[in-house]
Amino acid sequence: MTCCCPYSACAAVSCFREVADIAADLDSVLDCELFDMLSQSSSDIYFYVSDISSGRSRWSAAAVEEFDLKDEYQDGADWLWLCRIHPEDQPIFLRDLEQMLTGQNGDVHHCEYRVKNKAGQYVWIRSRGVLRRNSDGSAALFTGVLRNMGLNPKYDTNTNLYTIHEFRARLYETLSQPGQRGGILLFGIDDFSRINDVHDYAFGNLVLRAFAEKLLSLHLPGFLFRMDGDKFAYWMQDAEAEDLEVVFSRYSAVAAELTVGEEEIPLVLTGGYVLYPSDGIRAEDLHRRLEVALNTAKLSEPGGLCAFSSEMFRDEQRLDALRAAIHRCVENNFEGFYLLYQPQIYAMSRTCPAAEAILCWSSEEYPNVSHTELMAALEESGDILRLGHWALEQALTQVKQWQKTVPSFGISMDICSRQIVQRSFIDRICQLAAKHALPNGTLCLELNDGCYAAGSRHLYELTATLRKAGIMTALDGFAPEHLTLSLLKEIRPQWIKILPHHVFDSSSEEPSILPSLFALFHQLGMYVCAEALESSEPADIAIRAGADFVQGPLYSPPLDADTFYERFVSEQA
């Protein structure tokens, strides 16, 4: 049994997880000795265990005292607790619980909200919990830890940065004074939840702490805040757009080289910013516009920085409606989803040995949704986990038909970080490949750049598992800021895909390093594919540098299966 420090909410959740695993039945969890010990261990950390089916729960003595509960044992406590939560925070609480119960966030609950205590004051609570399921997948037991952060905590206990509450207080105070001007940068860590999924929340906190220390070591003017989740804010009085762009660039450079202990954990930052008074003079408006700018950047320019503009509000409303429409179609037996296929062509012979399967979706209301926009919506909602199984089944069924004509014909498909951290997803891929009896080396999974957030250890285990099953991997979208020679040697992908802007730079007068770079990839046993090629100039440069394959609209747009077969498969019979 893991020993639990009374001041560590993460350790307490881990301890409760073990309790749930070893208990013979739910009643033994509610009445176990460990709960009694934890209940007495702290006055500002509260524990509870809830039997989902019966609605019966048990709360620690400190929780009973602080929130004026009638007894340690409660029936229907979910409704009673909801009534104590501040009305503005109830939607946040309910949304997080719904995502946990539906499996969208990995059976983990984690959010912050305000709760009314026995004195009638609202105090900030950090809530963490773990859901245990029955063998049929239904919810069985929920164990949770509440951390009392006080009426208005000034410093974040993990990073020692100012909190979001301090950010709001200072923003209100500053903007209440006339003549104020400055800028605020809001940035988040891309795919940070995957770090928690691959490791655990305790390790995730170590990453945030190490990252905050690196940011502080830069000694930049202005104030740095830990916002909610994986987001941070930088605030500078009298700042211009150029100042915030420089800060974001320096923060991104630090993030890309982050290490925790001996493990490299390169992070990708995406950010948005506002300037006041030009973008607003009310604190609520500026905070909301910061979020809109960040959300827009995550969709349109991951790893980049976006300035707020009024058009973003309309885009945000459209995206909310789009996500809802996509989710309805996923629930309705994947209505409107289909695959197109784009040829991957030998650079020299111009024959086609493989295709990339591209997931698409359309509806009467949204007839022209881009692949990038679609994947962003699916990843954010978690629908990609269900849809990914369906899409892979469709792709493998199709390539098996083509292999009747060309036995060695290959198929590749994108997978994202949200998929690779699910062990069941990788097992399902191996099972499907075996079910369709695909020849070794004819299925390739393309890992997008968000997968780097999973960490080198998990990527090594993932690629090793797939390699044993005869499944190849590709690094999709060469990202030099994340790749190191040691990482390439560890994960040993069979393919690496290069985008045009890495191939062709008309403004550069320096000799190209592409031949040397491609030679290095070849020495490591990798094929090089130049993708998304739209014009002949970058294609010619890539081919002269030694690219093995080319792909993009220059050679063919994505095609339906029948058209693809007629143009690229049947001619090889």
Image (cartoon, grey):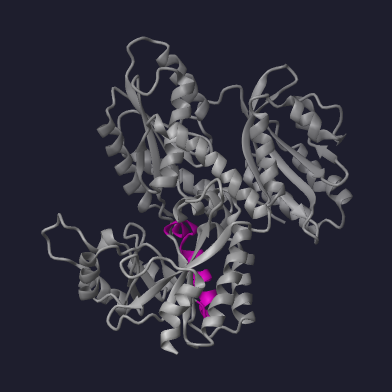
Q: Residue 8, position in %: x, y?
A: 62, 42
Q: Which residue is at 38% across, 32% downward?
A: 308
Give the image quarter of residue 265: bottom left
Image quadrant where one finds the C terminus: bottom left
Per the image, is 246 magenta?
no
Nearest the viewer among 462 and 415 is 415
Decide which of 39, 318 is in the foreground and name it. 318
The answer to whether residue 374 is above or below residue 322 is below
Q: Report if residue 444 is visible in the image.
A: no
Eyeballing the image, is 195 above or below 438?
A: above
Residue 299 position, x and y percent, is 44, 46
> Going by the picture, which residue comes out furthest to the left?
509
In this orientation, which residue lies closer to the viewer: 549 or 25? 549
The residue that appears at 34% across and 15% down in the rendered structure is 180
> Can residue 167 be seen in this snapshot?
yes
Report whether 308 appears left or right of 123.
left
Which residue is at the front of the view, 226 or 244?
A: 244
Q: Position of residue 238 (x, y in %)?
A: 28, 22
Quadrant, the N terminus: bottom right
Q: Is residue 462 magenta?
A: yes
The residue depicted at 46 percent of the width and 23 percent of the height is 285
Q: Which residues are magenta?
A: 449-471
- Residue 268 in the image, given as x and y percentages of width and height: 40, 50
Q: In the image, is residue 461 above or below residue 142?
A: below
* 314 sits left or right of 111 in the view: left
Question: Count the marks: how many?
Answer: 0
Horizontal side of residue 217 vs 342, given as left or right: left
Question: Which quadrant of the figure has residue 91?
Answer: top right
Dominant secondary structure (helix, strand or loop) of the stretch shown in magenta: helix
